[in-house]
């Protein structure tokens, strides 16, 4: 059960309404998803997160698809089902294939397993590989 109720678009006012409109415009959609509706309980958090996500996820030294794949990997590690699903879809819309996502899952699972083994055995760094 959620701690807060979502702010539906029909009930949005002020800053929340402005951010919702910007999301729809920039994403070329008429839909506001549940993440943004829930963040709307705190208009400052909603605005800050929307601004930050646009800045971080735009094309830079890393292309947008790679950034989405990284987002999926971190979401898997954090067990965030919502983000795994939404960013997998976003990655596919930016060119990722099913095979790429499948391989990503294998890499993340392997990294998590070996990370736990290293930490459990308290392995000290001994050589940096080139």
Image (tube, rainbow, N blue to C red):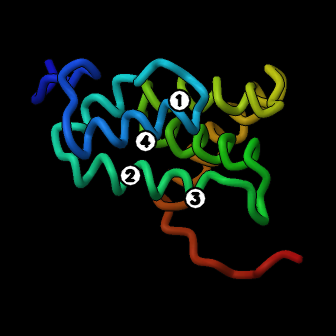
Q: In the drawing, what numbered circle is on residue 84? A: 1
Element type at mark 4: loop
CA separation in Å, label 1 and label 3: 18 Å
Give the residue displayed 45% in from the left and 55% down from the top. Answer: 51
Give the residue displayed 43% in from the left and 26% down from the top. Answer: 82
Rendered view: 68 above or below 4? below
Q: In the drawing, what numbered circle is on residue 78? A: 4
Rendered view: 68 above or below 28? below
- The residue wearing badge 3 is 56
CA separation in Å, label 2 and label 3: 10 Å
Q: What is the x, y in percent for residue 11?
A: 18, 22
CA separation in Å, label 4 and label 1: 10 Å
Q: What is the x, y in percent for residue 84?
A: 53, 29
**As rendered, which of 97 and 77 lies closer to the eye?**
97
Taking the image as shown, residue 43 lies to the left or right of residue 60, namely left
Taking the image as shown, residue 109 lies to the left or right of residue 119, namely right
- The residue wearing badge 2 is 49
Q: Residues within 10 Å of mark 3 (few under 14, many from 20)?
A: few
Q: Earlier in the sequence, mark 1 or mark 3?
A: 3
Element type at mark 1: helix
Q: Which quadrant of the view contains residue 38?
A: top left
Farthest left residue? 3
Element type at mark 3: helix
Which numbered mark, 2 or 1, is in the foreground of this view?
2
Q: What is the x, y in percent for residue 104?
A: 73, 36
């Amino acid at each position: 059960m959620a701690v807060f109720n979502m702010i539906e678009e029909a009930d949005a006012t002020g800053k929340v309404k402005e951010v919702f409109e910007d999301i729809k415009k920039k994403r070329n959609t008429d839909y506001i998803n549940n993440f943004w509706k829930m963040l709307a309980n705190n208009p400052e958090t909603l605005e800050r997160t929307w601004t930050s996500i646009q800045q971080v996820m735009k094309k830079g030294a890393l292309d947008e698809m790679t950034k989405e794949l990284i987002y999926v990997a971190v979401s898997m590690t954090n067990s965030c089902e919502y983000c795994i699903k939404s960013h997998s879809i976003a990655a596919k819309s930016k060119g990722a294939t099913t095979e790429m996502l499948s391989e990503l899952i294998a890499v993340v699972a392997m990294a998590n397993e070996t990370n736990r083994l290293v930490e459990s055995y308290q392995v000290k760094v001994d050589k940096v590989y080139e």
